[in-house]
């Protein structure tokens, strides 16, 4: 079985969770090529909608995601990756998770520590 890429114009949403803590690290999209590369390498690959190309997570930063388990939902149109996050941070902004903001008392606050300075990692 593989994702039904035809349902969403060739892309399927992909939720990425830490395999040990189950913390949600990010949401990205896979096309069929990203799916095949992920299966072949056991490292997360996605399709970058902004750059319109295949993206190997961590290729620039070194913060790769080693895939420990792959799951697919009942409709075969969403993928869940359980990963080991190398380097501790999944977010290109320097946080462990892309979900580092929380609504508190009607205002957005940062609810996680910065793990690296993106200016030092992405020239």
Image (cartoon, rainbow, N blue to C red):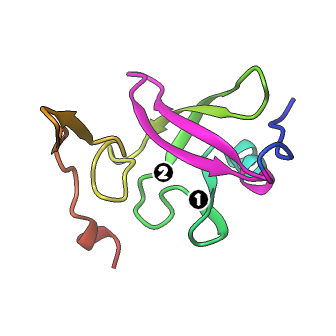
Q: Secondary structure at mark 2?
A: loop
The residue beneath circle 1 is: 56
Q: Which mark is residue 101?
A: none
Magenta residues, start to end: 9-34
Residue 99 falls in image quadrant: top left
Q: Quadrant of the C terminus?
A: bottom left
Mark 2 is surrounded, within 10 Å at the Cα level, by few (under 14), some (14 to 19) or many (20 or more) other residues, namely many
Q: Based on the picture, tell me whether residue 31 belongs to the magenta stretch.
A: yes
Residue at image location 24% in from the left, 71% down from the top:
120
User: Between marks 2 and 1, how big is the CA–CA gap?
Assistant: 8 Å
- The quadrant holding residue 70 is top right
Q: Residue 21's spot in the image, x, y percent? A: 38, 22
Q: State yes or no: discs 2 and 1 in contact (Cβ < 8 Å).
A: yes
The verdict on residue 58 being magenta is: no
Q: Position of residue 3 (x, y in %)?
A: 80, 37
Residue 64 is marked as 2
In the rendered view, does 46 fall on the left or right side of 100? Answer: right
Image quadrant occupied by the N terminus: top right
List x then y, in percent, for residue 75.
78, 25
């Amino acid at each position: 079985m593989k994702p039904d890429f035809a349902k969403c114009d060739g892309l399927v949403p992909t939720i990425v969770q830490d395999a040990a803590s189950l913390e949600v690290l990010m949401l990205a999209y896979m096309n069929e090529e990203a799916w095949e590369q992920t299966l072949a390498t056991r490292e997360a690959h996605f399709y970058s909608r902004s750059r319109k190309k295949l993206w190997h997570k961590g290729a620039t930063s070194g913060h790769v995601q080693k895939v420990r388990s792959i799951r697919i939902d009942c409709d075969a149109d969403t993928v869940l990756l359980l990963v080991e996050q190398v380097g501790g941070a999944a977010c290109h902004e320097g946080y462990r998770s892309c979900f580092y903001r929380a609504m508190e008392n009607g205002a957005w606050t940062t609810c996680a520590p910065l793990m690296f300075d993106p200016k030092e990692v992405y020239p």
